[in-house]
Each structure stands twice: as structure tokens, then as C-alpha cells.
């Protein structure tokens, strides 16, 4: 086992909450800034064209009122771009749809059952995909 990796002995179920682990994403995907920028709507792609990678702003969670530092690109995605009608459609591929749904809901943890209900996809298929050995787009079980 590689140093720094810890595996849970508990097998995820349809009730196990998942989320986007941005720490994993930043550590394992060199081009994560490029990818997040590609998800921006046309207006925000233009607005962020000259902004440095990693610039943060304070974001207030609308449910808990907790203030969290988030990158400007991430904030634009979570507060504006996710609300565009073409951001998440029924034709969006499964992993991409799950990733975009987490962005849409402020990355609040959701189980595969909840994801399935929101995406109109089988929860068991989502669970098999997310609970496998490979981590897709940093989507991992949520450990509070």
C-alpha cells in the first residue's frame, strides 16, 4: 500500500454519503484548474480569463452559514453556472452528472440513493461506480 493512502474496511452502501474531496482532486489531478474552468458558463469563462489560479474568496454555506474559503472559479460554478439549464442534463454521463450535482448542491454529502433519486439513475449503479477501486473526479465517501 502506498504511503499516505488509507483504505476503509467498511464497504460503502446505498446510504453511505459521498462528496467531492477537493484535497484528493488537487493532489491527484494536475489540470484540475483547467477542468473546473471548462465547466464555467461563457460569461464566467471570459470573466476569469485573467484571474490567477488559486485565488480564494469567502463563501457562506446557505444552509449552515459556515464561512469557507473557496476558489473564485469554484464559487462562480457553485453560485451561478450550475443554475444554467445546460449544466446538468439527462444526457450527461454518470460520473460527470454526479460531479456536477455535487457542485450544484454546494458539495453537501449525498448517498447513492439520494444521487439516484436526483439524477433518475439506479442507486446501485451509482454505488458500484463510486465505491470501486478507482476514484473518479475526486468523488469519495464522506468522513465527517
Image (cartoon, rainbow, N blue to C red):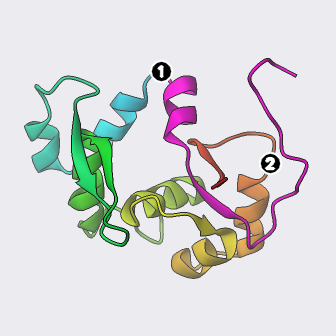
Which secondary structure, mark 1? loop
**Magenta stretch holds residue 3:** yes
> Which image quadrant is residue 115 in?
bottom right
Q: Is residue 54 above or below residue 36?
A: above
- Residue 3 placed where, x, y %? 79, 17
Residue at the spot 14% in from the left edge and 35% down from the top edge: 48
Q: Is residue 70 above or below residue 112?
A: above
* Mark 2 or mark 1, earlier in chain: 1
Q: CA distance from mark 2 to mark 1?
A: 22 Å
Q: Which residues are magenta?
A: 1-30
In this view of the protein, which residue sits in the foreground, 124 or 18? Answer: 18
Q: Position of residue 136 (x, y in %)?
A: 63, 43
- Label 1, on which residue? 30
Q: Which residue is mark 2?
A: 132
Tell me the quadrant of the picture where the C terminus can be found.
bottom right
Front in this rendered view, residue 48 or 120: 48
Which residue is drawn at the image coordinates 35% and 39% (left, top)? 36
Residue 22, which numbered label? none
**Pointers 2 and 1 in contact (C-beta within 8 Å):** no
Q: Residue at x 48, y 66 (%)?
A: 91
Residue 19 x %, y %: 57, 55
Does the magenta segment cover residue 60?
A: no
Q: Where is 26 relative to 46, above or below? A: above
Amino acid at each position: 500500500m502506498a504511503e499516505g493512502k488509507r483504505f476503509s474496511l467498511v464497504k460503502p452502501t446505498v446510504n453511505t454519503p459521498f462528496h467531492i474531496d477537493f484535497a484528493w482532486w488537487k493532489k491527484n489531478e494536475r489540470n484540475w484548474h483547467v477542468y473546473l474552468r471548462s465547466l464555467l458558463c461563457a460569461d464566467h469563462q471570459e470573466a476569469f480569463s485573467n484571474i490567477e489560479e488559486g485565488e480564494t474568496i469567502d463563501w457562506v454555506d446557505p444552509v449552515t452559514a459556515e464561512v469557507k474559503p473557496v476558489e473564485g472559479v469554484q464559487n462562480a460554478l457553485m453560485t451561478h453556472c450550475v443554475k444554467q439549464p445546460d449544466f446538468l442534463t439527462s444526457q450527461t454521463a454518470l460520473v460527470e452528472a454526479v460531479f456536477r450535482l455535487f457542485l450544484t448542491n454546494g458539495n453537501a454529502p449525498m448517498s447513492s440513493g439520494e444521487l439516484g433519486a436526483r439524477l433518475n439513475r439506479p442507486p446501485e449503479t451509482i454505488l458500484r461506480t463510486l465505491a470501486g477501486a478507482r476514484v473518479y473526479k475526486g468523488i469519495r465517501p464522506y468522513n465527517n
